[in-house]
Image: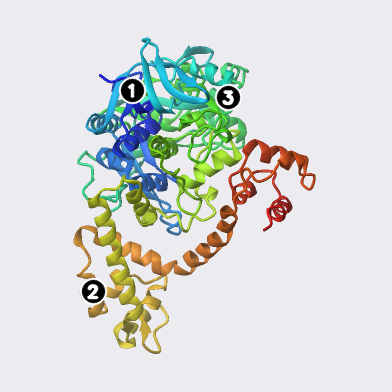
Amino acid sequence: MIKDYDVIVIGAGHAGCEAACAAAHLGSTTLLITMDMNKVAQMSCNPAVGGIAKGQIVREIDALGGMMGIVTDRSTIQFRMLNRSKGPAMWSPRAQTDRMHFSAEWRHILENTENLYMWQDSVVSLTIEEGRVTGVTTALGVHFSARSVILTAGTFLNGLMHVGRAQTQGGRVAEPASHGITEQLTQLGFEAGRMKTGTPVRLDGRSIDYSHATVQEGENDFHHFSFLPGERSSLRQRNCWIVYTNPEAHEVLRNSLSDSPLYNGQIQSVGPRYCPSIETKIVTFSDRDSHQLFIEPEGENTHEMYLNGFSSSLPWDAQLGALQKIPALKDVQVYRPGYAIEYDYFDPTQLKHTLETKLVENLYFAGQVNGTTGYEEAAGQGLVAGINAHRRVNGLTPFTLERDQAYIGVLIDDLVTKGVDEPYRMFTSRAEYRILLRQDDADARLTPIGRELGLVDDERFELMQRKYQQINQLIDFAKNFSVKPEQVNDYLELHSISPLKQSQKLYDLILRPQLNFAILAQLIPELHDELKCVEKERYDEIVEAVEVKIKYSGYIERERMVADRISRLDAVVLQGKLDYDSLSQISIEARQKLKKIDPVTVGQASRIPGISPSDINVLLLLLGR
């Protein structure tokens, strides 16, 4: 056994697994340390991956050569594409997974990755010499040396769980908390804080009356997460169900608020505003008579159900009493109640865009320790941290993603530039270039970058090249082929669509919202023949991508122009050029924030809350721009 590594990753959650795999795949000798090797990539909360904006992140991870999309596809028990009624920039893939299978798939990948080793233990301190991390010490007293360390401790740093007035130390139910690291880092000058998250009650599906619930079926088309066509689930697909709370349930909850850790002063930290507990919902939305809940299976064969929307830290009997007022759950049996958990995090403005800390060289933070929440956000950070830890120890240039390149770029820029005052969750609204960051083209945006980094192999790169060769050929055909009125007018008039008065390019015809390739291929033999040349295994994926590119070409081009114009500010280097304390031309607030964040570019400075456009103009003038 060796005790000297290029990269050590602390924690085997979603961030840690991606970080360790990325570093090892790139050639760094990597050690992944976890408290329990049977809990790697544990789905601590809901058994699902993806969703609004989160699904885009998973596709980006996959496009770069990460593993989350592959593991999800192999573990899926229901798949849906959300927001289909909106434009393609809003389409978001989401999968229910078998949580045990998901963890087992990750364990299999970790154990079979070259250069990657595992050690079951808890890290109690970091070894830091002359401002640089050089290793870790574990609870068993083992010291491992490393040239780079990535901290992905999730909710385990001084974790404290709450069920009513009962408190238990731990990072997850039945798992111990981690102590020592926060205390060490704060002594070094790091700013730490406390955040809170929670998880719902788990139900026995045999005790649910589904006749009082609305079924929510999955979809069975070509969509999935990984861009590799062979990665699909062989597991039995399962339904989800929808139920609603009611005034009677709310009354039980309201009568128990005095025992709620959120309202009796027991919990002081900030929780996620976008995913409130059920007790917060009835207080904040006191005029609402009901709230929607989703009953989600935890696996292919288990009876365990996750009650999405019923996160709570109320006493267990209050949770049960409220549930029994819901018709579908009147005889429900509970596996365990919901609980809240408080944990330590570090202000992410203490990080560079590479996720390396500013205070200690070669030390990286990823995941919930940066104030984020969600498996997908954690995995995206882990991938970036793993890539950069490898590049750092090998003397390579840092790797970063811009806001117009990826949601992961938006996520990291938001964290290091703006910081957090509540658990950060990605939304499509956070991305100003979301038309450019669609889930369908993440491979076009990022697979060439993954190839350059060394994470994308020949097979994936050739698949991507062949796909876009076919996409471009089909677009060229649409631009050059003229459709005669007699080929389509009967159909157009029958469906109250304006007929053609003269021949028109197929491209312009596809721009009409009522028309698509499937319809027009039945009317135009030449198009039918052209579509026969499209690769069968990826036919639907390629045709959908072409239609999106054509129908939204105007929006895409316009947004690209805006992004290019704004990105010029990101090309103006600011860091190290000015003494902010001496700048009397800008406000005291602006000076303080610029000094704290120390933005790398003027573009980053412009995104700091409290920095005005006039402040940016002053900076540009002082830089001679």
Q: Is residue 156 above or below residue 435?
A: above
In terms of depth relative to the viewer, which is nearer, 421 or 178? Answer: 178
Q: Where residue 247 sits in the image (x, y, percent)? A: 54, 31
Q: Which mark is residue 591?
A: none
Instruction: Look at the numbered disc 1 and give the secondary structure of its residue.
Output: strand
Q: Residue at x 33, y 22 (%)?
A: 4
Q: Which residue is mark 3?
A: 192
In terms of depth relative to the viewer, which is nearer, 319 or 378? Answer: 378
Amino acid type at circle 3 is Ala
Q: Which residue is mark 2?
A: 530
Instruction: Look at the numbered disc 3 and give the secondary structure of its residue.
Output: strand
Instruction: Look at the numbered disc 2 and give the secondary structure of its residue.
Output: helix
- Of tags 2 and 3, the one toward the viewer is 3
Q: Does residue 301 appear left or right of residue 185 in this picture?
A: left
| Residue 428 visible somewhere in the drawing | yes
Q: Which residue is mark 1?
A: 4
Amino acid type at circle 1 is Asp
| Residue 328 visible somewhere in the drawing | no
Q: Earlier in the sequence, mark 2 or mark 3?
A: 3
Q: Are marks 2 and 3 in contact (CB under 8 Å)?
A: no
Question: How far apart, in angstroms, are the residues tagged by discs 2 and 3?
Answer: 60 Å
Residue sitting at the far top: 141
Mark 3 surroundings within 10 Å by alpha-carbon count, few (fewer than 14), some (14 through 19), many (20 or more): some
Q: Quadrant of residue 306?
A: top left
Residue sitting at the far right: 584
Q: Does residue 548 appear left or right of residue 280 in this picture?
A: left
Q: Earlier in the sequence, mark 1 or mark 2?
A: 1
Amino acid type at circle 2 is Glu
